[in-house]
Amino acid sequence: MAENPMQCPRCNDALKYMGTKRFHEGTQWGMLGNVAELFENREHFDVYMCPRCGRVEFFVDGVGEEFRPH
């Protein structure tokens, strides 16, 4: 298996792992602050970026990680 099997579909350069990022849906809760954050829908994504063209790929954290190098 190649060292980094993930290639950019635009320019065929190897994608670089940028870490796991947390995103959440919802609105600003103002003065409720962190308490309101408990009710937000949160997703974690592994982020990969092409260093040549800047394309970004998101993958669900915890699913199919055996196919992605970190």
Image: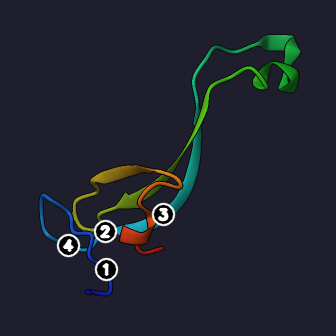
Q: Residues within 10 Å of mark 4 (few under 14, many from 20)?
A: some
Q: Residues within 10 Å of mark 3 (few under 14, many from 20)?
A: few
Q: CA distance from mark 4 to mark 2?
A: 6 Å
53 vs 1, nearest the viewer: 1
Q: Name the kind of residue labelled 4 in the image.
A: Asp
Q: Say which element carries label 4.
A: loop
Tell me the tag on residue 13.
4
Q: Residue at x 14, y 69 (%)?
A: 12
x, y percent for residue 27: 64, 14
CB atoms of marks 2 and 1 within 8 Å? yes
x, y percent for residue 41: 62, 26
Q: CA distance from mark 1 to mark 3?
A: 14 Å
Q: Residue at x 76, y 13 (%)?
A: 29
Q: Residues within 10 Å of mark 2 (few under 14, many from 20)?
A: many
Q: Which residue is mark 1?
A: 4
Q: CA distance from mark 1 to mark 4?
A: 10 Å
56 vs 64, nearest the viewer: 64
Q: Which residue is mark 3?
A: 18
Q: Say which element carries label 1.
A: loop
Q: Residue at x 29, y 57 (%)?
A: 54
x, y percent for residue 7: 21, 69
CB atoms of marks 1 and 4 within 8 Å? no
Q: Say which element carries label 3.
A: strand
Q: Name the kind of residue labelled 3 in the image.
A: Met
First in residue order: circle 1 vs circle 3: 1
| 68 vs 25: above or below | below
